[in-house]
Image (tube, rainbow, N blue to C red):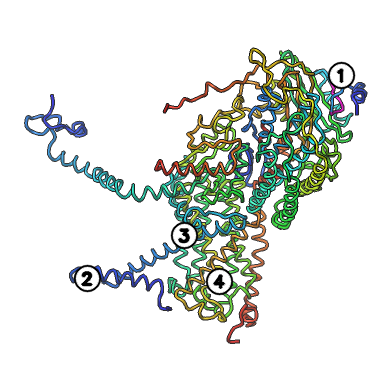
């Protein structure tokens, strides 16, 4: 049988009164209990309304763009070198290219990084360590596959020990072609990633 | 130093295990020996001929048999020499050189790993380049490499 | 603090590559070490068996990414040995020039990385700045900064562009002045001497026992250099000294490498003079056709034609910036090498890590390993 | 301008605001609102807020200064594309770290992991309430400011060690132990060098010490103490050549290896706050604080906020010296550092105390001062 007033499921399960006294014309749940439930629901609802108010106004117009600007202008890559591209990665931080101009500062601890630049061939032996490092990085985080090896195995694609592309292991945002890519190409990749972050509004 | 000199120096002490010497371009020559006398040959080459520096140990899979070769260097003669021995493919093992030249340690680990040649009495014969527990020996001719087609991940957006 | 094992690597600022140094420590004291390699094992020896002779050169550049040309030279020597081909003299000079420029580039890279390990930050930038000048030279005649593919079986791919020798001389002048600054920054600093003197000692006898070669061996007072002891290419026609030092420690290795830089500059000036005076072909005249153009002779079925080329085994050994590298190439008369085997100097140098690390402090690991000059690409191959 | 102090400014602000608000209320409420006790309390709060804002702004500017200067020492340019000349780079870093996840490692001790950096940050901030920046910018009536400042300054190793230990990482632990050992070893010579200054100035009050330097700055007569103080300060600030706890080459990131997000930002900020405090202390104790030598034309000292201006110029120059040292020296080893600390620095600092005592008793301070005293 159906009760005239839709019974909140929590109250029906909780209160013995609601189940025991199904009289016609009377709400299945006593008034006081309904009030109690309403008052319980008021706080989350108010919170939700308030946050949605903020979300529609302030957050999307002011807060989000600021954090988006901050996030894309301060990308800390993980300081590690896998193979050949690592040398060009280092050269990009050298005097001639100076990636620090864009606020790109390599950090040694994955906890402080936003960006993992996979600069070289990924082998199956290092695969699970790479995944561990990626998981140790706090959100939000991005991955750049630098060079042909990280993109798709490169000249070692046929080798028995090489992962044919790091996108088999972690999600990749930007691919940089080259074997190895020149430092300009790496900087361009980072700038592309900045554009990507701006477009995706992350 | 010429192959004849190598032969002359080695014949008296380890002649029983010596299979012959031959010229090898760029080195003093190549010494072929039987694997039973490996340790004696190593000692003789190091002590009597003065090849105190072991540069390289490598293995070749000739399908019907396997070959181990050692490259040694003498500071007095300023020359390299090659030692090599053939092992049957069914039972490829040879005495370790790391008791004579400690530098053979890692080279033999690598050779065991890649070409599947057992080195008896090796102090530390475990995987060096491949992960622990890797079951294959990639540099054998029977180990084929191919394009990794089966690993392709088709894009979901297509 | 009780004893514990710590992993330095594979992602660690000390490693300069992808390897793992497991260290057993008590407090700050090192009790035992166990290097764990193979994180960059790319199966180069196996891939080479599937490739044309000239295609292996591509892999050689990536084997040791800071000394690509030296490794190309190593492989080319062995391959020419196996195929019985002689290059023209100008090609030999060009290759020697490549070797020595590569040594300069590699040693400057080493300097940058090593001094950064000591916490000295500016020289890293100075080193990268000066190395870029050398790379610009490479770029002007090979077209690439790091992976050149310049040498070919039978010669080199192309001759030098116009005005190269003058530009190279200007770079050498600039570098010679910078080497003085490098020394002032390091040897002139009391803290540097305090950190490096008597550190990571490996005596000459131990070096020979454990197969250690290159600047590490020469820093122990042993005057062994393949360029002088077993000259290849045109080193027997060049005038240079072998750099040696006595300390067998980190400072001695620094001194040896710095002296090698100066000797390389000296050799390069002689080579550039010779190249100016002797124009000529840079590629051998008589080459098997399939060497000049890979995949050209294809049979009816679409397979490469079998060649009846004399079989042979090639062996070569060069003094690479890190030490003595060797190649062993087996030619079975086909387009592909049957077996290629390389000996990496760093492979042997790292395998002796227990000899020169145990007994020092944790803080000493970066300078000691830095002085070894690790290039993981050639260790793992 | 001399009567315009930071406190009077905040007092004025609060008074004006409260009177304006109170004017719209009826009498009893107006009376409560204009209660002098309430005014004083609110003025203190505003005073603190101003201090906080100023110190934070300065710290961020200091990081920018270091990055640019370091870039120039290294033949490159440093941050330059975010904001004018990269001035907004550190704000971007800060906002980004604010939004980032803070990962608490499994088996890390939550209390120590979160409390360590927070208290480290707080103790570094407290210092700015103590240090006088100019004749107007000071907290006023504390007689023992120098002692208090150094006491608060030396809290840090404890909390670094707590946070390092509780993050359950071997590298962190080693960095924390190094940090504790180093800071304790260099605390003693640092304090002894300060004793030399106190002997000459005759006071523990930083304002008094600055006014004692109106005729001659202390760096001349107390040069030895200055050297010891700067070296000790370098060790306390954990900068190259004494940055062993964060030695990147062997210890990854040292004691903040496991910290990311806002907690890492706390560490960075606190580090630079302490660096700023170190530079400020050098200026206050040895370089005459906000005063200029008497022979400087009055035009340079009479414009508004001249004291703060010159103080900041000196502070940034002193910090520039620290950056220069960082760009040109390698790092020392732990045992060497401790040996130098206990065997060299302490005798040297004792010697400097002795010299200071001799100078005071022989009344020959002006002779060694960089500027002769106008009185003779």
The subunit letter for the residue under badge 1 reads B
Residue C156, given in percent of the width and then of the height, sits at: 74, 33
Say which residue label 2 marks. Answer: D23
Q: Which residue is mark 4?
A: D285
The disc, 4 or 3, on the residue closer to the chain's N-terminal end is 3
Q: Determine the CA span between mark 1 and mark 3.
A: 79 Å
Quadrant location, the N terminus of chain C: top right
Q: Is residue C7 visible?
A: no
Viewer-side residue, D318 vs C342 = C342
Q: Nearer the viewer, mark 1 or mark 2?
A: 2
Screen quadrant of the C terminus of chain C: top right
Question: In front of the other: label 1 or label 3?
Answer: 1
**Range shown magenta:** B26-31
Please tell me which residue is depicted at 74% across the width and 36% down the height of the picture. Answer: C345
Between circles 2 and 4, the one closer to the viewer is: 2
Return the mark for residue D123.
3
Do marks 1 and 3 share a subunit?
no
Tell me which secondary structure the magenta stretch mostly adopts.
loop
Crowd class of label 4 (few under 14; some 14 to 19; many from 20; radius 10 Å): many
Compared across the picture, whether A134 is left or right of D44 comes to right
């Amino acid at each position: 049988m159906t009760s005239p007033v839709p019974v909140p499921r929590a109250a029906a399960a909780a209160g013995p009164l609601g189940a025991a006294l199904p009289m016609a014309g009377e709400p299945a749940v006593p008034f006081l209990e309904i009030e109690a439930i309403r008052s319980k629901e008021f706080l989350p609802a108010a919170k939700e309304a308030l946050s949605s108010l903020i979300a529609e106004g302030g957050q999307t117009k002011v807060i989000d763009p600021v954090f988006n600007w901050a996030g894309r202008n301060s990308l800390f890559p993980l300081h590690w070198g896998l193979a050949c591209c690592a040398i060009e990665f280092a050269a990009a931080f050298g005097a001639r290219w100076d990636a620090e101009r864009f606020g790109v500062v390599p950090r040694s601890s994955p906890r402080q990084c936003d960006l993992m630049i996979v600069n070289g061939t990924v082998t199956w032996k290092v695969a699970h360590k790479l995944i561990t490092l990626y998981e140790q990085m706090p959100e939000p985080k991005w991955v750049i596959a630098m060079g042909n090896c990280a993109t798709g195995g490169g000249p070692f694609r046929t080798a028995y020990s090489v992962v044919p592309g790091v996108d088999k292991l972690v999600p990749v945002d930007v691919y940089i072609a080259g074997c190895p890519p020149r430092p300009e190409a790496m900087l361009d990749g980072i700038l592309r990633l900045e554009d990507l972050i701006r477009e995706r509004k992350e | 130093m010429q192959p004849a000199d190598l032969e002359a120096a080695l014949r008296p002490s380890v002649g029983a295990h010596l299979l012959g010497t031959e010229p090898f371009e760029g080195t003093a020559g190549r010494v072929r020996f039987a694997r039973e006398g490996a340790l004696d040959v190593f000692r003789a080459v190091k002590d009597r001929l003065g090849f105190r520096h072991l540069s390289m140990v490598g293995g070749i899979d000739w399908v019907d048999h396997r070959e181990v070769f050692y490259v040694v260097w003498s500071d007095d003669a300023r020359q390299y020499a090659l030692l090599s021995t053939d092992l049957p493919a069914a039972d490829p093992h040879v005495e370790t050189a790391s008791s004579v030249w400690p530098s053979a340690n890692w080279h033999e680990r690598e050779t065991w790993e890649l070409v599947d040649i057992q080195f008896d009495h090796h102090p530390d014969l475990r995987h060096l380049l491949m992960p622990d527990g890797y079951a294959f020996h990639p540099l054998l001719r029977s180990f084929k490499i191919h394009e990794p087609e089966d690993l392709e991940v088709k894009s979901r957006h297509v | 603090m009780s004893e514990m094992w710590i992993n330095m690597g594979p992602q660690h600022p000390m490693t300069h590559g992808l390897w793992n140094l497991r260290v057993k420590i008590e407090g700050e004291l090192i009790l035992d070490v166990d290097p764990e390699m193979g994180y960059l094992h790319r199966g180069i020896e196996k891939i080479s068996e599937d490739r044309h002779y000239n295609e292996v050169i591509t892999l050689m550049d990536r084997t040791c990414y800071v000394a690509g040309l030296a490794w190309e030279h190593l492989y080319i020597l062995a391959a020419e040995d196996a195929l019985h081909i002689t290059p023209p003299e100008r090609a030999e000079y060009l290759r020697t020039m490549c070797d020595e420029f590569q040594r300069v580039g590699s040693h400057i890279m080493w300097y940058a990385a090593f001094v950064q390990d000591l916490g000295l930050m500016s020289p890293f930038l100075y080193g990268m700045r000066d190395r870029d000048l050398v790379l610009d030279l490479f770029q002007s005649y090979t077209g690439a900064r790091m992976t050149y593919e310049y040498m070919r079986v039978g010669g080199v791919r192309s001759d030098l562009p116009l005005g190269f020798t003058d530009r190279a001389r200007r770079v050498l002048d600039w570098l010679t002045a910078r080497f003085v600054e490098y020394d002032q920054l390091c040897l002139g600093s009391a803290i540097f001497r305090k950190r490096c003197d008597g550190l990571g000692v490996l005596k000459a006898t131990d070096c020979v026992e454990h197969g250690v070669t290159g600047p590490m061996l020469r820093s122990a007072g042993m005057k062994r250099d393949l360029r002088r002891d077993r000259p290849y290419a045109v080193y027997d026609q060049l005038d240079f000294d072998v750099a040696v030092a006595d300390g067998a420690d980190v400072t001695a290795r620094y001194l040896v490498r710095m002296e090698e830089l100066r000797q390389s500059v000296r050799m390069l000036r002689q080579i550039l003079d010779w190249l100016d005076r002797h124009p000529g072909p840079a590629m051998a005249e008589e080459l098997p056709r399939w060497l000049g153009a890979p995949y050209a002779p294809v049979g009816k079925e679409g397979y490469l034609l079998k060649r009846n080329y004399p079989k042979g085994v090639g062996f070569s050994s060069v003094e690479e910036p890190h030490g003595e590298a060797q190649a062993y190439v087996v030619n079975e008369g086909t387009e592909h090498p049957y077996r290629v085997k390389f000996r990496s100097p760093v492979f042997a140098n790292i395998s002796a890590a227990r000899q020169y690390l145990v007994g020092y402090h944790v803080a000493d690991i970066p300078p000691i390993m830095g002085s070894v000059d690790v290039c993981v690409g050639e260790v793992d191959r | 301008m001399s009567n315009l102090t930071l406190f009077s400014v905040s007092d004025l602000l609060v008074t004006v605001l409260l009177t304006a608000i109170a004017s719209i209320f009826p009498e009893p409420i107006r009376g409560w609102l204009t209660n002098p006790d309430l005014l004083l309390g609110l003025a203190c709060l505003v005073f603190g807020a101003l201090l906080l804002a100023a110190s934070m702004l300065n710290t961020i500017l200091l990081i920018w200064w270091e990055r640019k200067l370091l870039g120039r020492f290294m033949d490159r340019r440093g941050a330059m594309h975010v904001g004018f000349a990269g001035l907004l780079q550190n704000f971007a870093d800060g906002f980004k770290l604010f939004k980032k996840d803070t990962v608490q490692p499994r088996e890390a001790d939550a209390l120590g992991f979160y409390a360590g950096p927070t208290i480290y940050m707080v103790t570094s901030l407290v210092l700015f309430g103590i240090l006088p920046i100019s004749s107007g910018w000071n907290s006023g009536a504390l007689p023992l400011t120098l002692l208090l400042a150094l006491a608060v300054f030396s809290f840090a190793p404890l909390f670094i060690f707590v946070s390092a230990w509780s993050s359950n990482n071997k590298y962190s632990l080693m960095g924390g132990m190094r940090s504790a050992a180093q800071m304790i070893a260099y605390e003693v010579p640092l304090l002894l060098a300060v004793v030399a200054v106190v002997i000459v100035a005759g006071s523990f009050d930083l304002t008094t010490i600055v006014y004692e330097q109106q005729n001659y700055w202390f760096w001349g007569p107390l040069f030895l103490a200055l050297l010891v103080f700067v070296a000790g300060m370098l060790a306390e600030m954990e900068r190259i050549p004494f940055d062993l706890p964060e030695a990147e080459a062997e210890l990854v990131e040292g004691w903040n290896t496991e910290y990311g997000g806002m907690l890492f930002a706390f560490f960075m900020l606190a580090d630079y706050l302490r660096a700023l405090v170190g530079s400020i202390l050098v200026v206050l104790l040895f370089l005459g604080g906000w005063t200029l030598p008497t022979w400087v034309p009055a035009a340079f000292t009479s414009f508004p906020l001249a004291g703060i201006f010159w103080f900041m110029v000196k502070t940034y120059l002193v910090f520039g010296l620290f950056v220069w040292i960082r760009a040109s020296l390698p790092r020392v080893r732990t045992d060497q550092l401790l040996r130098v600390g206990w065997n060299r620095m302490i005798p040297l600092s004792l010697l400097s105390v002795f010299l200071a005592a001799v100078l005071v008793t022989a009344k020959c301070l002006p002779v060694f001062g960089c500027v002769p005293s106008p009185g003779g």
